[in-house]
Image: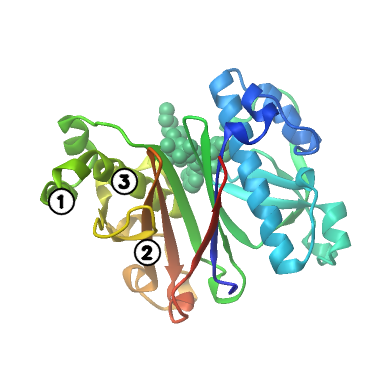
Amino acid sequence: MSDEMIHWLLQSAAEHPDLARGVPPPGVFSPAELLRLEQFRFDKRRREWLLGRWTAKQLLRSHLREQHAFDAPLDALVVAREPGGAPTAILAADQARKTGWPVEAVEELPLIGSAGEQPEGPPLTVVGVRLPVSLSISHSNRAAFCALLPTSGANSRSQIGADIEQIADRSEQFRTSFLTPAENQWISAAAADLSNTLVTATWSAKESVLKALQLGLTVDTRRVTALCQAAGDLVQWTPVQIDCDSAILPHPNADDGVSTAAFYRLTGWWRVEDDFVLTMALLETSQGIEKPKESIDGEIHG
Ligand SMILES: CC(C)(COP(=O)(O)OP(=O)(O)OC[C@H]1O[C@@H](n2cnc3c(N)ncnc32)[C@H](O)[C@@H]1OP(=O)(O)O)[C@@H](O)C(=O)NCCC(=O)NCCS
């Protein structure tokens, strides 16, 4: 298993009886996370948050086991939110010290990164170290899908985006409002019985790209074109050809000395799992692009 591997995990609410009931299983959440959970007003959001965090924590723990031979308690693996909403993984300070993390890396970090999202009361924080991983979380209909990319060395600026969507029949208006003409032509040229799957996969792949770019749905989805290949076994990871408006790519640092488009590469994959599609998008900088292609390692429970 190489350092550059993308890890992923799919879990359903049936994984643990407490998740099925919408309550936190013991030993999984830190005190700040339990306070955060109490702030959700809607049961659906509470359940998806629980299942998404559960899945992310399982994935982080197995990564730390493999990479650092360290068995972290789940309640020491905290998933916080960056200001734009993207998740970030934190290892609580007491556990970080046990594994020899440099003491100066320990910070007090907000659990929710944006003032606009802060519910009333004192801000929730966690004291710990940011783990060198890029993490992405998605929920759909009592399932959660997470992907993790280690971001050490040449991968330090790479970012992963992941999305899960239930396959559904979408209207013509959906196709014209959210997909590009190139995507619609690509889907129309494929077998008719794949149409719903491909429309769902295309939408999902665009969301994965926008998560890898840490933008979410703040930009028009037609600024990304995702062509999901449909030859072969669709329950295996299958390539997605991605093109996007270079204006939505992050700006290279001044000392990188290159133009935006030359500096970044976006790669995508998709697959079918029961009545869901899973997609992932990887944003790499030219620092990391010379190395061999990522391999994809994962597990399904549900
Ligand atoms: C991010 C976004 C694309 C997610 O789409 P979705 O299909 O509804 O939800 P998913 O379950 O697939 O993904 C949700 C997860 O994406 C992640 N996420 C949120 N914003 C993100 C961003 N800017 N970049 C990367 N990941 C992000 C979070 O981990 C979130 O789960 P969490 O809140 O439990 O931590 C969408 O919610 C979005 O763009 N939101 C920002 C814009 C916004 O809030 N608009 C208001 C709409 S009323």
Relative placement, left or right, of 294 versus 270 is right
Check disc 1 and report its element: helix, strand or loop.
loop
Q: Quadrant of the N terminus?
A: bottom right
Residue 64, image x, y percentages: 71, 61
| Image quadrant assignment for residue 153 | bottom right
Write down the residue under mark 2: 267
**Residue type at mark 3?**
Ala
In front: mark 1 or mark 2?
1
Q: CA distance from mark 3 to mark 1?
A: 13 Å
Residue 232, image x, y percentages: 27, 60
Q: Nearer the viewer, residue 252 or 176?
A: 176
Q: Are marks 3 and 2 in contact (CB under 8 Å)?
A: no
Q: Nearer the viewer, residue 253 or 58?
A: 58
In front: mark 3 or mark 1?
1
Write down the residue under mark 1: 190
User: Measuring 55% from the left and 39% from the top, which residue is drawn there?
Assistant: 302
Residue 39, image x, y percentages: 67, 23
Image vertical order of residue 35 relative to residue 104, above or below: above
Check disc 2 and report its element: helix, strand or loop.
strand
Q: Earlier in the sequence, mark 3 or mark 2?
A: 3
Q: CA distance from mark 3 to mark 2?
A: 15 Å
Q: Are marks 1 and 2 in contact (CB under 8 Å)?
A: no
Write down the residue under mark 3: 201
Image vertical order of residue 259 relative to residue 114, above or below: below
Q: Are marks 3 and 1 in contact (CB under 8 Å)?
A: no
Q: Nearer the viewer, residue 206 or 249?
A: 206
Relative placement, left or right, of 128 versus 145 is right
Near mark 1 (Cα within 10 A), the count class, few <14, some 14-19 or many ≥20, is: some
